[in-house]
Amino acid sequence: MTLRFNPALARVVEPPIAEAYGWIDGRIFPDHKRLIDVCQAVPGYPPPGVLTAHLANVVQRPLTARYTDIEGSDALRAALAADIRAAYGGGVTPDQVLIAAGCNQAFCLTLMALCAPGDEAILPLPWYFNHHMWLQMQGVTAVPLGFRPESGGVPSIGEAEAAITPKTRAIVLVSPNNPTGAIYSAAALRGFFDLARRRGIALVVDETYRDFLGTDERPHELFASPDWPSAFVHLYSFSKVFCLTGYRVGAVVADRALIAQIAKAMDTLAICAPRIGQEAALWGLEHLCEWRSGNRLMMRARLAAFHEAMKRNDNGYRIVSAGAYFAYVQHPFGDRPAQDVARRLADQQNLLALPGSMFGEGQERYLRFAFANVAAETMVPIAERLAADTARG
């Protein structure tokens, strides 16, 4: 007997990260030219020892093996609300916070609550592939906004307004952006918020990487607007900040009525986010302020080193936008498919990056570099290998 599958799920592509790692499966890299992996946005440094030591004690407590409340522990929700107030201003309260198993789940729960099959959500190109994959699985149409390299990857508010239809339920933004690294200005985010509020839809902003901004200025002041819950949904990830990728903990910050709807889905999918991840995130918020700041500066140094290394005039690759963990780079080979360029870099230069084509239509000229797991001194070898690839033509 042949089983029949959900056609909405069957049409979704295989996970792109797994595909890329398949290109190097089984290979052994020589000492003189080791693999440089800029494929996945995973921190290359471990959690601090004081955090893992704390967790070694916490995991022995009988309560740690039990569920928290569906929306997350009261202590973590209060701590995140306080952290948001300090970072953004405004008056976010704990009952406007739901703790999820990572930012991906936070997105999935939010869009599940906002959109029914047949509805639409606006996604700027290039989009984070997991966002697009989830919408496909749910029968929700992703309406693309054109990529604007001339604006550093920041999408057009006017184009977004023109794309709104009676079926539109949300505009989704990622800032700092994955894959482009683009950081949307406070004015741009305010413009999208005003548009969403005026048209009666949600502005969903994934701010997974907001702890790795290039400056210490506030990303925006939307939380300071007394009517922010009417249109704004904030998604946040503890996983990237505290190196908790194995614990998967994130959050949705939104209107209380939306949180209540999301909680229904959360209870069905996972009961609650894993308690050990919540305990780690809470301790991190309360005790690791200086450690967070140090990592922010380290990532800024890596970004600066990448910019400096890419000033070589013989590699042909051009940075279109960069920030936080990412750089979006235009390759010099015209109409050659991005996947062919990326595979050749992996095969011949032992440099693993993702092709822009994994992030939506019209992205064949670009590659994504995720440099969170490579040290600043590795940026020069990256540029050297790109130059060697260009020389091959």
Image (tube, rainbow, N blue to C red):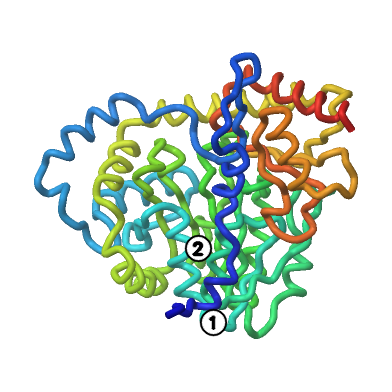
- Residue under label 1: 117
The residue under the point 36% across, 31% down is: 288
Q: Residues within 10 Å of mark 2 (few under 14, many from 20)?
A: many
Q: Secondary structure at mark 1?
A: loop
Badge 2 amino acid: Val
**What percent of the width, then of the height, locates residue 370?**
61, 37
Please say if 89 is above or below 14.
above
Left or right: residue 253 versus residue 201 is left
The residue under the point 79% across, 51% down is: 364
CA–CA distance in space, label 1 to label 2: 20 Å
Q: Residue furthest left?
A: 62
**What percent of the width, then of the height, locates residue 304?**
68, 25
Q: Split into 4 quadrants, where in the image is the N terminus?
A: bottom left
Q: Split into 4 quadrants, where in the image is the C terminus?
A: top right
Left or right: residue 20 versus residue 145 is left
- Residue under label 2: 233
